[in-house]
Image (spheres, helix red, strand yellow):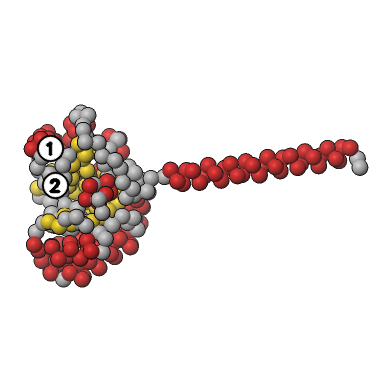
Amino acid sequence: MNIRFFIACIVLIILAACNNNNNKSAAADSSKTALAQPVPGTPIKYDSSKRYIFLTWDDSPQPPGTNICKRIFHEAGVKATFFSVGMHYNIEPRRKRLLDSIRNSYPEFLLANHSFSHAFKDNYNFFYTHVDSAVNDFVRAEKEMGIQVKIIRLPGRNTWAGKTETKGPKTSENVAKKLAAMGYNIIGWDVEWEMVKGNSPKQGASELANKINDKFESGYTNEQNTMVILAHDRMFQKQPYMDSLKAFIAILKKDPRNVFETIDHYPLVQNK
């Protein structure tokens, strides 16, 4: 056998073996990365010395408000949850892309369920007295928007429900109980950033931050050392209100006890 041919064969065998090992190593690294990727709903360990703040913004996708809030949260380095509405998602491709970007941004942002029709377009009395139709509305929203967690906020009702508790207005009780029996957690709110004229913040940044601190200090929250804040995406479309949101977050961040989390880490959800 020609000695050069023999040497060439040996080299090819060695290279093939190296490539095979490299491929196995790459596959192993890929597997480790997949395992390390956070999954919505994975519990966290609470620190009793901290105060947990859940920014929960309703009615997305509502551009430009949703885009603006998402950008402000990202720049401030805080986590937030977007309770979204199916009929807003289906309007046009750009809204679908916006909501897809929220879904794909976990653990920074979490996509949660705020119904498909927003209580049959704000027809609250009819919605909550037709229990099966209301429940189906949430199931449809979950399916069409690809929501990965069984976490719901009822439109127009400050209701809490899950395996360990049910409380809130009587008008929504039957819907909440049926959803809870199906494995859903219903999340209300401790403080609302209220609106005037349908789209402008009522309270200023300092006023709202002071109210939150007072509630923390008095222990007047649904769960100890937690604060669920409700607002709506469309409130922050104009520059003065964008600035107010930035100032509000900055005030809260000054207190080292405050930790921002997504609502899948709320105690009611974790203790299911």
Distance between the Cα atoms at labels 1 and 2? 11 Å
Q: Residues within 10 Å of mark 1 (few under 14, many from 20)?
A: some
Q: Is residue 247 above or below residue 156?
A: above
Picture coordinates of residue 28 (x, y %)?
A: 54, 44
Which quadrant of the figure has residue 262?
top left
Task: Quickly name the residue at label 2.
Answer: 222
What amino acid does circle 2 point to? Asn
Q: Residues within 10 Å of mark 2 (few under 14, many from 20)?
A: some
Residue in the picture at 32% in, 50% down: 41
Labels 1 and 2: the sequence-earlier one? 1
Q: In the drawing, does residue 36 fall left or right of residue 76?
A: right
Picture coordinates of residue 19 (x, y %)?
A: 66, 42
Residue in the picture at 21% in, 70% down: 133
Picture coordinates of residue 160 (x, y %)?
A: 16, 54
Q: Is residue 253 above or below residue 107?
A: above
Task: Quickly name the residue at label 1.
Answer: 216
What amino acid does circle 1 point to? Phe
